[in-house]
Image (tube, rainbow, N blue to C red):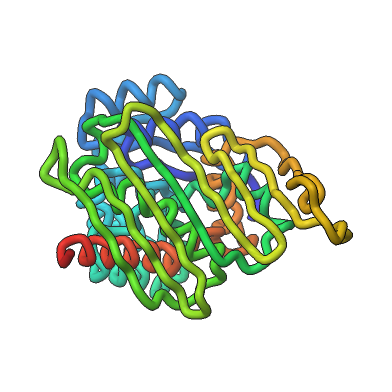
């Protein structure tokens, strides 16, 4: 494939506007236009990034080869299926869908039409995660904290599929796809009818454990992940994209007088780069025939399934 990939954007709310800015300056894709049910907002965002607003979704779909979808979760399946029915590749913002039945319909449509379906679990592209990868070796314990101040966006769903699902995806990925054997969780609905604060303990076949906390009713914004493995532990600040690896020294004294005698601190570094920009570049690359998406539709379904399982554990507590 030569030339720029003609791509469209569906949904230009708070998150979609970030997609619009990145796609407008992509070196491999041409943003043909945007669509939004709010015509005033759609026209305003289109003008801001120098592209065209399409009031009719089908008019946009017939002019592109791929779309990114950033509409409310309840509309993911409807919009995604319309694009996939035209054999348009889809980058679907997380969660993949509102239910597993809808997720399965999207997966079947993508497979049947032979086009990529990527899911927007953007933390996979986080600089801290990229920097930690060379040192990862079968982590056994995960501890994540994701806190955010309250805002109306995203409160049409529980915090489990709004925020916690980022960390559920990371844990599933970093555990190597191990089977989840048990989920215990608790959560509280405050400020909205949906759960806004939750904690989950997830156990995997082989003994790995994850302790995950998410809140969208906090005063401060926090995104931290710690991982423990046989030869040390990682402390990652996902918000800053930085981290350290406290690695056991290969040569240690028989008698240790301090922590420094036992471990060395490795400052984790990776090439700088915007995570959303990297995610979009990955999607464009998969459409152009390079390796499959970093976060496949099946992985997006797995993260959704685990988030729903956490919800069931909270309901049954």
Residue at 35 percent across and 74 percent down: it is: 182
Q: Nearer the viewer, residue 292 or 9?
A: 292
Q: Is residue 81 visible?
A: no
Q: In the picture shown, does residue 31 fall above or below 294?
A: above
Residue at 34 percent across and 66 percent down: it is: 306
Quarter of the picture containing the N terminus is: bottom right
All told, the count of numbered labels is 0
Q: Is residue 135 visible?
A: yes
Residue at 71 percent across and 49 percent down: it is: 246
Report x, y in % for residue 262: 78, 53
Q: Is residue 72 left or right of residue 110?
A: left
Q: Is residue 313 left or right of residue 251?
A: left
Residue at 44 percent across and 53 percent down: it is: 167
Report x, y in % for residue 155: 21, 40
Report x, y in % for residue 289: 61, 62
Q: Nearer the viewer, residue 134 or 74?
A: 134
Q: Nearer the viewer, residue 68 or 123?
A: 123
Report x, y in % for residue 99: 23, 64
Quarter of the picture containing the C terminus is: bottom left
> In this view, which residue lies farthest toward the left?
193
Q: Residue 12 occupies which quadrant of the picture?
A: top left
């Amino acid at each position: 494939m030569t030339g720029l990939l003609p791509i469209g954007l569906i949904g230009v709310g708070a998150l979609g506007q970030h997609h619009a800015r990145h796609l407008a300056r992509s070196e491999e894709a041409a943003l043909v236009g945007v669509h939004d049910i709010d015509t005033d907002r759609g026209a305003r965002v289109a003008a801001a990034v120098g592209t065209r607003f399409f009031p009719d979704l089908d008019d946009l779909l017939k002019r592109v080869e791929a779309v990114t979808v950033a509409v409310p979760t309840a509309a993911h399946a409807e919009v995604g299926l319309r694009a996939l029915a035209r054999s348009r590749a889809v980058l679907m913002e997380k969660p993949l869908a509102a239910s597993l039945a809808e997720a399965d319909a999207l997966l079947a449509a993508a497979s049947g039409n032979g086009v990529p379906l990527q899911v927007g679990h953007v933390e996979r592209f986080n600089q801290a995660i990229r920097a930690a990868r060379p040192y990862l070796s079968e982590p056994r314990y995960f501890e994540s904290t994701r806190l955010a101040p309250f805002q109306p966006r995203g409160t049409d769903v529980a915090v489990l599929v709004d925020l916690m699902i980022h960390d559920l995806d990371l844990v599933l990925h970093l555990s190597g796809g191990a089977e989840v054997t048990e989920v215990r969780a608790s959560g509280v609905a405050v400020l909205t009818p949906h759960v806004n604060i939750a904690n989950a303990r997830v156990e995997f076949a082989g003994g790995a454990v994850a302790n995950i906390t998410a809140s969208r009713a906090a005063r401060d914004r926090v995104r931290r992940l710690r991982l423990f493995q046989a030869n040390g532990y990682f402390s990652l600040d996902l918000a800053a994209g930085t981290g350290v690896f406290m690695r056991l020294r290969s040569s240690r004294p028989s008698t240790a007088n301090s922590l420094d005698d036992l471990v060395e601190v490795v400052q984790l570094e990776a090439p700088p780069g915007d995570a959303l920009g990297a995610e979009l570049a990955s999607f464009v690359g998969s459409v152009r025939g390079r390796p499959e998406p970093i976060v496949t539709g099946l992985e997006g379904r797995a993260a959704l399934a685990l988030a729903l399982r956490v919800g069931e554990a909270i309901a049954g507590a």
